[in-house]
Image (spheres, helix red, strand yellow):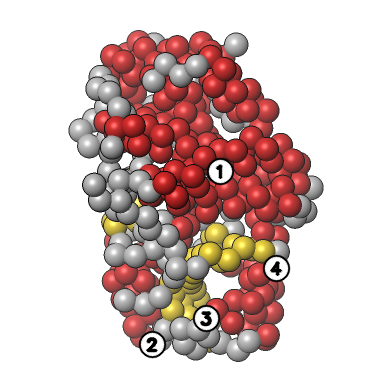
């Protein structure tokens, strides 16, 4: 049995750490390409200026166009080449970070990933989601390595809208349960091996941290301040969940998310919000104990994560709609087939309807 664990070369987290960006850029060279939207750049410009003054480096502003497309990746690759950039910096949300990782991959340059929200576990990963010019999903690109540095400034995340943090909790909530299912079925993880004991321990720690610190962290974010609870949840959302999902694998919860995207009503909801409901469906599918199901539903309600279809904007629930979701979740190649038993669209339909009843009470 081949076991594989992958991770960023370095993960660094702390309040006001973006001010030290120059120190990390200088580890790789003197000129960096910044992949960030104008909004995200403006939000942290004072910190970038302070970083340059503190430890001089050249920053080339790439003016990311907000969508991770092949054309945008190529445009920024040209900017990188024209300016002889030594390192790529992705700053902002997932699409900017994925674009920076892609440029790093194709140009064979190191990449520094700077998330400004903690809404998903994507910053640590070795993949990117590519979209069409119309914003529709096109494909995944897998890279030969994870980011060279993930730099998380918790002060920036504390000032972001709290809904992003809570959505990250929903994404992180799936990590342990999907890892557990992949372990039971000996399913491959993202790099194509089986999980290590270390990765499974990280996934479990992620879940335990969420239960312990989520409510306190949400209050901290609402007050725009950094506390130890917020530090812990940011670490869970980004690092623990990132290592846990990539090195242990995905299963039903994320497949349910993908299925839910076929309903127009869900398009205004974040990835992690849909995944949270997917966790409840996942547990129904495996006939988890009532105690475990109640713990998850209570947790989701306590932080404001969806526990029913109504919470995801689906006010008119019909058999046709739900079977469409179930069929998409069971498409060939979907991660639901990593469950330790055969899953059919009919099984998923029943689990969604049951989860909706349980979570809707």
Question: Which of pointers 1 and 3 indicates the residue nearer the eye?
Answer: 1
Kindly report which numbered mark, 3 or 2, lies closer to the viewer in this rendering: 3
Describe residue 355's horizontal placement relative to residue 50 as left or right. Answer: left
Percent of width and height locating residue 63: 48, 70
- Identity of the residue drawn at 27% across and 27% down: 330
Mark 1 or mark 2: name the one nearer the start of the chain.
2
Judge whether residue 241 can be spotted in this image.
no
Q: CA distance from mark 4 to mark 2?
A: 28 Å
* Residue 220 seen in this snapshot: yes
Answer with the quarter of the image where residue 338 lies: top left
The CA span between labels 4 and 3 is: 16 Å
**Residue corresponding to mark 2:** 84
Q: Percent from the top left, x then y, of residue 250? A: 36, 39
- Reading the image, the residue beneath label 1 is 205
Q: Is residue 83 left or right of residue 218?
A: left
Cα distance between the residues tagged 1 and 2: 42 Å
- Tell me what residue is drawn at x 22 percent, y 37 percent: 333
Looking at marks 1 and 4 on the same chain, the residue that comes earlier in the sequence is marked by: 4
| Circle 1/circle 2 CB separation < 8 Å | no
Residue at the spot x=63%, y=47% of the render? 233
Residue picked out by circle 4: 16
> Circle 1: is it few (<14), some (14-19), or many (20+) Cα within 10 Å?
some
Residue 9 to residue 200: above or below: below
Within-10-Å neighbours for mark 3: few <14, some 14–19, many 20+: many
User: x, y percentage for residue 274?
Assistant: 48, 32
Residue 216 vs residue 328, the one in the foreground: 216
Q: Secondary structure at mark 3?
A: helix
Q: Which residue, given by chain and number where applicable, does mark 3 sit on?
A: 25
């Amino acid at each position: 049995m081949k076991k594989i664990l992958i991770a960023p070369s370095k993960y660094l987290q702390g309040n006001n750490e973006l001010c030290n960006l120059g120190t990390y850029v200088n580890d790789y060279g003197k000129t960096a390409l910044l992949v960030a939207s104008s909004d995200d750049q403006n939000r942290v410009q004072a910190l970038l200026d302070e970083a340059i003054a503190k430890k001089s480096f050249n920053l080339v502003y790439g003016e990311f166009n907000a969508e991770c497309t092949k054309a945008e990746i190529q445009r920024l690759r040209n900017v990188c080449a024209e300016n002889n950039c030594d390192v790529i910096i992705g700053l902002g949300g997932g699409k900017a970070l994925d674009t920076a990782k892609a440029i790093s991959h194709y140009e064979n340059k190191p990449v520094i990933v700077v998330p400004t929200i903690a809404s998903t576990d994507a910053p640590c990963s070795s993949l990117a989601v590519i979209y069409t010019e119309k914003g529709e999903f096109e494909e995944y690109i897998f890279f030969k390595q994870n980011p060279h540095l993930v730099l998380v400034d918790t002060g920036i995340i504390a000032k972001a809208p709290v809904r992003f943090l809570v959505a990250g909790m929903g994404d992180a909530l799936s990590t342990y349960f999907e890892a557990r299912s992949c372990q039971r079925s000996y399913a491959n993880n993202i790099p194509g091996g089986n999980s290590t004991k270390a990765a499974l321990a990280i996934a479990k720690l992620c879940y335990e941290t969420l239960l312990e610190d989520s409510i306190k962290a949400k209050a901290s974010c609402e007050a725009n301040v950094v506390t130890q609870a917020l530090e812990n949840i940011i670490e869970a959302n980004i690092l623990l969940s990132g290592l846990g999902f990539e090195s242990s694998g995905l299963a039903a919860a994320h497949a349910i998310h993908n299925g839910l995207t076929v309903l127009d009503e869900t398009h205004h909801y974040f990835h992690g919000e849909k995944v949270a409901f997917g966790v409840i469906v996942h547990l129904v599918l495996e006939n988890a104990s009532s105690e475990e199901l109640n713990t998850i539903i209570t947790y989701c309600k306590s932080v404001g994560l969806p526990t029913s279809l109504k919470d995801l904007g689906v006010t008119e629930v019909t058999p046709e709609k739900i079977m469409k979701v179930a069929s998409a979740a069971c498409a060939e190649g979907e991660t639901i087939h990593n469950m330790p038993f055969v899953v059919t669209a009919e099984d998923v339909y029943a689990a969604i309807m049951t989860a909706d009843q349980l979570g809707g009470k």
